[in-house]
Each structure stands twice: as structure tokens, then as C-alpha cells.
Amino acid sequence: MKLLFSALFMAFFFISTSAQVSDSLKLGKNNREFFIKGDQKFKFSEYKKVFTNPEALGYMKKANTNGTVAQIFGAIGGGLVGFGLAKEIFRTKTAYHNGVAYKQKDKSGWGLVGIGLGAIGIGIPFAISSGKNMKKAINTQNQTGGTDETKTTSYKLDLSGNSIGITYSF
């Protein structure tokens, strides 16, 4: 009898700890699963469906704007750095002076590299701010739970097909 009770206790303990589905929001690992809420996965573009708290939605809009600005400055800076380095690698050109051809070095590539690094440097604080605002949005959404309802604890007996289960919601 003790063995039966201990087996049932272990089974219910295992079921209650492993079958919990959390309503908290967390970041995923890629863009297809950017937000994970319970067992649902959302893309970044679906953030308006995920965030129901107005304060969290405001943080998320700031994160989206800052991320866009960071990407623009990063793309422009990367293009300028790449173009400037390519210009430095292939910097010799043929010049003619009094009918004599000689190779002349073009020195304008390093200026473009410097401007590109400056643009990337401008984009970095925007990217950091975007990440911080996204974390604030997730924390704000998780603290309020997205709704103002009070959570209640309940048990429910699930009967479906050939299976019987007990659901514990809290």
C-alpha cells in the first residue's frame, strides 16, 4: 500500500512540475521565434499581438525605432568602410605627365573608412538602447501579466479519448 501511494505521489508530482505552461514572455533564439509566450511563438513583426500592456507596447515601439535607426547607420557605415577599403586596395592609377606614364596613388580611401566607422559608432548606442527597451518591455509585460485580472488556482479533470488527466492552473 505504501508503494502504491508513493508511486501515485511521484506521478502527480512529476505531472504537476512538467506540465506547467507559463504565460510569461521571453525572447526566442531567432527571428521566426522572436517572442515565446507559453507554447506560442511569435515573429518580431507580431509584437503588437504579444504586448497588451500599453507601457510595454511603448517600450517595444521605442525598441523598434531605435533598432531601425541602428540598422540604417550600420548599413551606411559598413558600405562606406567596404568601399573605402576597396579603394585603398586598388588605389594605384596611371597618370600622364609630359607624355610619360607613371603610377599615382589615390589617398581618398581612408577618409571613407573613417566616415564609415563614425557612422557605425553612431549606430551602436541606438542598438544598445533598442536591446534595453526590448528587455524593459518584456519585464513590464511579465510583471503585469498583460491583464488586470486576478489569477486563481483551479483543478480540472480532463477526459479525452483514451486518456484521463488532471490540470492544475495557477
Image: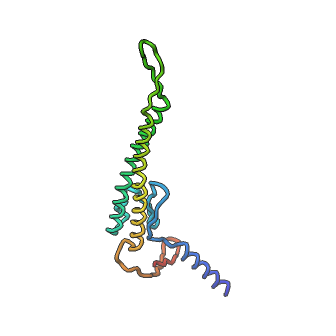
**Quick check: 144 above or below 99?**
below
Quadrant of residue 49 within the rendered picture: bottom left
How many labels sit on residues?
Answer: 0
Image point (34%, 55%), residue name: 65
In this rendered view, identify the residue nearer to me: 154 or 131: 131
Residue in the image at 37% along x and 60% along y? 47
Give percent across and percent down for residue 134. Answer: 41, 62
Quadrant, the C terminus: bottom left
Please tell me whether residue 108 is drawn above or below residue 138 in the rendered image. Answer: above
Q: What residue sits 44% from the left and 67% below the top?
A: 25
3 left or right, relative to 169? right
Which residue lies most toward the bottom here? 1
* Residue 5 screen position, x and y as percent: 63, 85
Q: Please provide percent x and percent y for residue 157.
A: 48, 79
Image quarter hosting the N terminus: bottom right
> Looking at this rendering, what residue extends furthest in the top direction?
99
